[in-house]
Amino acid sequence: MFDKMLTRIRYAVALAALIALTGGCALPAQHTNNTAVQAQATIKTPDIYDSEDAAVVVKKDAKAGTIQLQNIATSKRYTLGYDGTTRIFDKNDVAISMQQLKEGSVVTVRFYRPDKSLSYIKENADALNLPNLSNYELDLNNGEITVGKETYLLSSSVVVVSNGIETEPFELNAMDVISVWGYQDRIYGINVEKGHGYLRLENEDYFVNGWVDVGDKVIQKIEEDMLLVVPEGTFNAMVSNKGSSAMQEITFARNEEMVWDLGSVEITVVQTGKIIFTLTPATAKMVIDGREVNTSKPVELTYGLHSMRITADGYDTVAQYIKVAEPSANVSVELEKSSEPESKEQESEPEKKSEEDVQEETPVGKKYALNASDDDEEDQEEEKESEERSSEKKDDEDPEGILSASDKYKVYIDAPEGVEAYLNGSYIGITPVDFPKAAGNYVVTLRKTGYQTRSYTLQIDSEKKDVNYSFTELVESDE
């Protein structure tokens, strides 16, 4: 009897405690509004959202489960959390993973503002998308990018991402392969699909004043202490000088520097190849390395790179490089008719300029000057006299001192301090440093041992005033 009473007492106490925990009500939860609201707030379900945006993907953090976005209309940035309940689609409504969603892409997002949780994200089907562009012109002065015949405006807050890391538009190089996203004629996001790395030549004395060619994408005259910007990927790199050459396959990683030691390469002996040219029209004239050649018979050229210029009355001039790397070859060139025929004076002037350019680009190096033959010495004297005559002529044609203006106005690289600076691959000094101002596009590369090398594309105007640039500090290398 006592045991039964004790059991009833325990049951009553337990029931009282349960009622107390439920706020004094023993009704089921679904009949209590407050409790139902609290339960709903703690359980996240798909399609629960109170905001929708058109935005650009800026950054993804898989470890933290977050994504940073930039609103298209306001440029405001915010970070949302995502998990297994977040629905992710491409523009065709096909489910994809967060990893497949590219930085720089324009998306439609739906999210729940109170806890900043991402419910839904989809590649915007109405957005402009131009993938894997390699032929484009970037004009940062006017904030434009031209693809074919179409020109698009760059948003003032355009998002540029390379390898998942946000960067600046002027860190893009013309050789980069990019994908762009936008609306109508305005670009809001850019992703670098293939970027650029760097090539340094060591023990290059033998090839100074010759040429370096990286996959036919970078062709440049060799100087001492060069640091070339080269495309990301694997390419055949070749150096040549006066018929001698060396070649090596090199893989260039994005933003990393490769060193090619030319002191240990196998140099081929001087070789020549015979090239049979077929020109259309047949009356076309050809100039190679500043000298007119007779194309009615095979033209013998040393191995390596040569400048070629073909002209004809009523046709557009062709000016490009030709690489000789085999004993014989056939080259056909068909000129296109010019819409506006040039006068004879206009035609002869560029040809004359080409010869002067070649003479300036192919001087005899110090190593060869010491062992030059009498003929070589005479050639050097003729070149020197030609340069002096050219200089005098330029002075006569420039009474207003346009040439001296480039010496008067400078482009200054002020920061970061204490790093090596290269202009179009040529070493110009330790920052702060300057160079003569002349209108055009330039690539400035900054390097310091133990830090990541960076390069910037500068578009210099023709205004008669100095220009100053200050770049961000270099980041320490992981190695």
Image: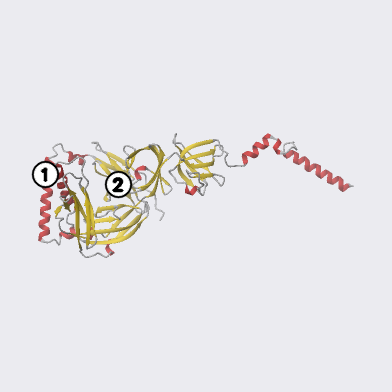
Q: How far apart are marks 1 and 2 (CA)?
A: 31 Å
Say whether residue 415 is left or right of residue 121.
left
Could you tell me if residue 304 is visible in this image? no
- Position in image of residue 105 (x %, y %): 44, 43
Q: Which amino acid does label 1 sit on?
A: Glu
Please rate how many residues cluster around mark 1, counting C-alpha atoms within 10 Å: few if below 14, some from 14 to 19, many from 20: few
Q: Residue at x 14, y 47 (%)?
A: 352
- Position in image of residue 400 (x %, y %): 15, 36
- Splitting the image into 4 quarters, where does residue 146 fall? top left
What numbered label is drawn on residue 443? 2
Q: Which residue reaches farthest right? A: 1
Residue assigned mark 1: 392
- Position in image of residue 204 (x %, y %): 25, 59
Query: Is 280 drawn above or below residue 470 in the view shown?
Result: below
Say whether residue 117 is left or right of residue 450.
right
Query: Which of the colour schemes (rainbow, by chain, secondary structure, one colour) is used?
Result: secondary structure
Could you tell me if residue 110 is visible in this image? yes
Q: What residue type is labelled 2?
A: Val
Say whether residue 460 is left or right of residue 398.
right
Say whether residue 60 is left or right of residue 426.
right
Please rate how many residues cluster around mark 2, counting C-alpha atoms within 10 Å: few if below 14, some from 14 to 19, many from 20: many
